[in-house]
Amino acid sequence: MKQEVMIVTGAGQISMAIARRTGFGKTIVLGDRDLSHAETIAEIMNQAGFHVIPFEMDLSSRESIQELIHEAQNYGPIKYLVNGAGVSPSQAPIETILKVDLYGTAVLLEEVGNVIEEGGAGVTISSQSGWRMPQLTAEEDRMLAMTPTEELLSLDLLQPDHIRDTLHAYQLAKRCNEKRVMYESVRWGEKGARLNDIAPGIIVTPLAVDEFNGPRGEFYKNMFAKCPAGRPGTADEIASIAELLLSDAGAFITGSTFLADGGATASYYYGPLQPEN
């Protein structure tokens, strides 16, 4: 008897925390650009009683995403998606951030939506960064949500002369993730499935440590010091939200973004993190 299948992308701390919280009794196909990372996580989880298949995949490539889905279908019906793959502003240039975080996520949601089983559910991980950039127009948000995936990177607002730096590119990518989830949730709903987004703040992961040691390190340390929570978050706290969204307890939740940043965004707009004029 084939088990239900959960596709997980990004062999990082958040993906693993969600998979451990929700992946028991399922076959987990874990995709990552670095196969050794996926193999390491798979070994840790398999020794704890899970069934994890590591797979090399590139989120920026539709063909690679399709290969991941085909591999997953070998084990049973695809019922769940956890997308934790991506790059940070300190890890990659503007072009890569847009190709991976923006285009790649849009393609993944589209392709998995084509095969998701009835009663299925998915979560994708965006970021608080999508909430702290100047508001886009309603038409720009609509374009990010609904433009055909292969035309996304041709949008005028995503051209190099309109993007200030890698952080701005990252913010645009994460805003697109949230709008794309709203759009794709309608398509997923036609198949009886749900799709939501989690926008974490500063979560202690190797990626976050790169940011702490990068050019914006002091900015991020100041952010969590002055947010209401007074600390960064943990991957397990994000997994708690994902557990709700992927379970029957979240059956009335779809097309939504859950901001989990310890109040940093609230402080940015209405508290001590407000930028100086």
Image: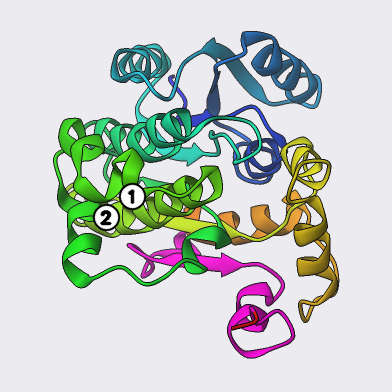
The picture quadrant where one finds residue 183 is: bottom left
Q: Is residue 197 left or right of residue 195?
A: right
Q: Which residue is mark 1?
A: 162
Q: Establish if 2 lies above or below 151.
A: above
Kindly identify the residue that appears in the image at 15 percent across and 46 percent down.
147
The image shows residue 89 at horizontal and vertical percentages of 60, 41
Give the residue type that dot 2 points to: Ser
Q: Secondary structure at mark 2?
A: helix
The image shows residue 207 at horizontal and vertical percentages of 72, 38
The image shows residue 126 at horizontal and vertical percentages of 50, 51
Q: Is residue 61 magenta?
A: no
Q: Is residue 172 left or right of residue 34?
A: left
Of residues 225 and 197, which is closer to you in this image?
Answer: 225
Which of the image's four quarters has the C terminus? bottom right
Kindly identify the residue that appears in the image at 41 percent across and 18 percent down.
72
Of residues 45 and 148, which is closer to you in this image?
Answer: 148
Q: Secondary structure at mark 1?
A: helix
The picture quadrant where one finds residue 260 is: bottom right
Give the residue type that dot 1 points to: His
Q: Is residue 194 left or right of residue 205?
A: left
Q: What residue span does the magenta drawing correspond to?
A: 248-275
Q: Earlier in the sequence, mark 2 or mark 1?
A: 1
Q: How many marks?
A: 2
Q: Establish if 142 lies above or below 27.
A: below
Mark in front: 2 vs 1: 1
Residue 189 visible? The answer is: no
Q: Which residue is mark 2?
A: 185
Kindly identify the residue that appears in the image at 83 percent across and 41 percent down.
213
Which of the image's four quarters has the N terminus? top left
The image shows residue 123 at horizontal and vertical percentages of 46, 49
The picture quadrant where one finds residue 95 is: top left
